[in-house]
Amino acid sequence: MATGSELGDYLRSRRERVRPEDVGQPGGDRRRVPGLRREEVALLAGISTEYYLRLEQGRDRHPSEQVLHGIARALLLDGDEETYLHELARPPRPRSRRAARPAKVSPGVESLINSWTATPAHVHGPHLVTLAANPMAVALCPHFAVGVNALRAAFLEPEMRELYRDWDGMTVKAVAYLRSVVGGGADDDPRLVGLLGELSLRSDRFRTLWARKEVRRKTSGVTRMRHPLVGDLDLHYEKFALPEAPGQMLVTYHAPAGSDTRERLDLLAHLIT
């Protein structure tokens, strides 16, 4: 579950990034702290300064939906950020005593992605460990193979810096996506705690990005790679949640017909057959 400090830290980080002039407040050089003052957030959210202070200090952990919505509006949070705020403030769920079953991809989904002989596709679970991958996905990136944690590889495997032409941008999106996925439940998951601890110790880049507390559940876009066999690729990716398997996400990569990237994907498919 989320602790009071997690909620407070998130509120503080979002408050400090809002420029006073963006919400109709006077700016100027006299401000001693970045962003908005607590009393300004409270006024904009329609709550008392004392109550908002209790939230940032962790003395109140579960404000109402109405209060959260008012704070989200005051801090100019987008949809992903407001959803994350609500997750942090949600009361803890009772812990199940049942041992978690190993995550498996349904035979139908596995058969589907294996039928895509020229389209890289893989399925990952909530910890971003690959649960299923077709041959094209592994040919595109060996770290998309089953059993590999793609997030861990992104920060700790040197080949990933060579593969991604915009490694900095990719890592920003990856960390913001992870935070959106775990919500306020990171402390309840030993595997996730272990992953975050390892990455924080071994990667300065991850530690810096995680501290930003940015949230973005981006499910489509373009990723740019430099493949060692076929050269530069501008790949459109799409992520689809699998409703029958909570926490599992199907990720596909494609390129428009007639594009250089499409031709290079076809070449990659030919090379692995």
Image (cartoon, rainbow, N blue to C red):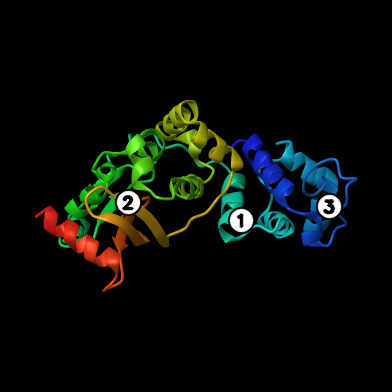
Give the side of residue 234 with respect to residue 134, left or right.
Answer: right
Measured as percent of width and height from the top left, residue 229 is found at 22, 50
Q: Earlier in the sequence, mark 3 or mark 1?
A: 3
Give the side of residue 103 with respect to residue 241, left or right.
Answer: left
- Whole-Å distance between the Cαs marked 2 and 3? 47 Å
Q: Amino acid at mark 3?
A: Glu
Vertically, is 200 above or below 74?
Answer: above
Q: Nearer the viewer, mark 1 or mark 2?
A: 2
Q: Residue at x 50, y 41 (%)?
A: 185
Give the side of residue 2 with respect to residue 56, left or right.
Answer: left
Please, what secondary structure does the residue beneath circle 1 have?
A: helix
Question: Outermost residue, left direction?
Answer: 273
Question: Outermost residue, right direction?
Answer: 30
> Which dot marks residue 82?
1
Q: Quadrant of the N terminus?
A: top right
Please, what secondary structure does the residue beneath circle 2 have?
A: strand
Q: Which residue is mark 3?
A: 40
- Whole-Å distance between the Cαs marked 1 and 2? 35 Å
Please, what secondary structure does the residue beneath circle 3 have?
A: helix
- Quick check: can you spot residue 65? yes
> Which dot marks residue 106?
none
Vertically, is 257 above or below 129?
Answer: below
Q: Residue at x 68, y 53 (%)?
A: 64
Q: Residue at x 27, y 39 (%)?
A: 102
Q: Amino acid at mark 1?
A: Glu
Q: Residue at x 29, y 45 (%)?
A: 130
Measured as percent of width and height from the top left, residue 96 is found at 41, 37
